[in-house]
Image (cartoon, helix red, strand yellow):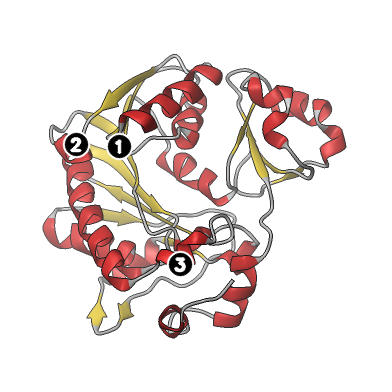
Amino acid sequence: MQFKQSFLDRYEKLTDIEKFKEYSIKKKRKAVRVNTLKISAKEIKERLKEFNLKQIPWCEEGFFIEGYEIGNLKEHFLGYIYIQDAASMIPANVLEPKGVVLDLAASPGSKTTQISALMKNEGIIVANDNELKRVIILEQNLQRCGCLNTIISLKNGLAFKEPVFDRVLLDAPCSGTGIIRKSLETLKTYNTEMIKKISNLQKKLMLSAFDSLKEGGKLVYSTCSLEPEENEEVVDFLIRNRDAKVEKINVDIKRGNAIEEFEGKSYSSEVKKCLRIWPQDNDTEGFFVAKICK
């Protein structure tokens, strides 16, 4: 797979470009999360012992798994396991969900089902997405996993304004530069104009998500992008426009340094409290997570 020179020029300012290239095209490790609404991790380890499950350090219910056609396993169809990238298991745990929760961009439901399991099917989750075909996939996964505390919503994410939620997760639509190893097409479609457009949408969604929080509520913002414009810049934008406090994320994972300055733009030092994960850090997908308090 060929990397565009403009992409390499940009990313060599951000990380070890050779390591990044190596891990971005390396075959990714498969991972599953045990759905504790239906079964325990101990039972799954026994049922799938031939697949050599290895504990993911930052998620008690998460395991790296060896083998092919994981999606054809009986345990998958029964909703006992959810096939989910290892780093993407972080946002729901960091959210510490309780009460009334909004998952603003919920489909396909990996994080929604995880939140439901963490809440033990108690409280209320509003799982929203803005496309019918995505909502259908979301509904199927919620049913398969036995999530009973979830209301599905089909709305533009910008429509949420009223401060009624104790927790909000915004796993924002993004460029996907952290998951090139999962979708090599990202390298073909990548361009900086696209990044700017996505960043503008993310900033609007971030304000909506924050405005939907009750006082004292918590917001987790995450992307599978490694672009500063989609991550630190969005957090910086929120800080400049709302009375938001960034909280430090303590997770047992190797992390990269937050980007405080890039291509002539400077961001608040508060972004250092966010979590930036490069593919080469833990042999996972790349990810960004921010935790914010109102």
Residue positioned 24% across, 84% down in the render: 264
* Residue 235, picture quadrant: bottom left
Compute the Cα span from label 1 to label 3: 28 Å
**Going by the image, does 149 lie left or right of 217?**
right
Q: What residue type is labelled 2?
A: Ser
Residue situated in front as seen by the camera: 213 or 159:
159
Q: Report if the CB atoms under discs 1 and 2 are less than 8 Å apart.
A: yes
Please tell me the numbered disc located at residue 188: 3
Residue positioned 49% across, 28% down in the render: 113
* Residue 269, picture quadrant: bottom left
Residue positioned 40% across, 57% down in the render: 248
Residue situated in front as seen by the camera: 268 or 149:
149
Residue, disc 1:
104
Q: Which amino acid does label 3 sit on?
A: Lys
Nearer-N-terminus badge (3/2) = 3
Nearer-N-terminus badge (1/2) = 1
Please tell me the numbered disc located at residue 212: 2
Q: Can residue 80 be seen in this view?
A: no
Residue 54 vertical placement versus 142 (above, below): below
Q: What element carries label 3?
A: helix
Q: Number of numbered discs present? A: 3
